[in-house]
Image: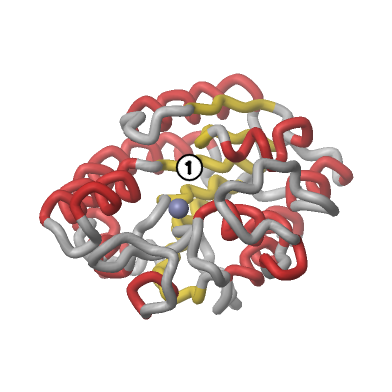
Amino acid sequence: MPRPLVFVLVDGLSRRGALAMPGLAALVARGEAFRWSVEVAEPTWSRPNYATLVSGLSPARHGITRNEQRQPLDGETLFDTLRQHGLRTAVAGYHWWNELVGPRVDGAWYYVADDTPDVVVLDQAERLFADIHPHFLLVHLMSVDYAGHREGGYSLAYQEAAQRLDGHLFPFVSAWQERYPHGAVIIGADHGMAERGHGGMSADERVVYYFAVMKPMPGRWPGSQEGVRAFLEALILDC
Ligand SMILES: [Zn+2]
């Protein structure tokens, strides 16, 4: 029996931002969530890291090294592997996901505006999991990254965006857990955020937190973005 998994990708969530999320911190404190550090791929841009997340390859190997590279991701991805196992996948995320892996996904809803509210995306994600029962659902939220680009990664506005998301995340996570008591929720980021955005190699941009909300907790977890694909695949398939 596969384990249904939702991966909540919070774009541009730095460790500083993650620590500003009280609901998530409470889950960790109660032992209901596990938190660990992941080193993201270089360069610390979004599109190369999206591609690394679902291919397991570094940008040098999958070939997508710039945000401007609008092309499908070559080679096998997590979506393809799951499909080969007869499993269903879905994405509620920014339209770059459609460019990367669109035809390989069973159900999808994409948005174009960077300031699309998280609640709108989470509503669409809930609709997808109610309609098509995906074994893997990728939910990709942009509000934190948007605030970081406008106001900076050390700003109050950035912290507030993370806090607001924290409030919206829990009804969503609870709904998923209610529907799939043996399911898993992984929350992670494509890259962090420094005072003036991202793209560089400072620790605030390069090292992010990931969270696992599941029982039992995973025995191993990846230390790098390249390891996330195999980690998600094993959680879904090996249980
Ligand atoms: Zn990003």
User: Residue at point 66% right, 26% down?
Assistant: 107
Pick the quarter of the image with the C terminus: bottom right
Q: Is residue 36 visible?
A: no
Q: Is residue 117 above or below residue 200?
A: above
Q: How many marks?
A: 1
- Residue at left offset 11%, top offset 55%: 156
Q: Is residue 115 rendered to the left or right of residue 186? A: left
Q: How is the image coloured?
A: secondary structure
Taking the image as shown, residue 228 lies to the left or right of residue 34, namely right
Whether residue 92 is visible:
yes
Question: Residue at coordinates 31% horizontally, 44% vertically from top-left?
Answer: 146
* Quarter of image, res 17: bottom left
**Where residue 183 sits: x, y (%)?**
56, 48
Whole-percent x and y of residue 132? 65, 24
How far across and down, in percent of the image, does residue 109 sit? 56, 25
Specify whether 149 is left or right of 52: left
> Of residues 174 and 195, which is closer to you in this image?
195
Q: Which residue bears the numbered disc 1?
A: 140
Instruction: From the viewer's side, name the closer residue of 140 and 147.
Output: 147
Give amino acid for label 1.
His
Quick one: label 1, few (<14), some, or many (20+) residues within 10 Å? many
Furthest-left residue in this view: 156
Q: Which residue shows up at 34% across the image and 69% down it?
A: 31
User: In the figure, 193 relative to 143: above or below?
Assistant: below
Q: Position of residue 26 (x, y in %)?
A: 23, 61
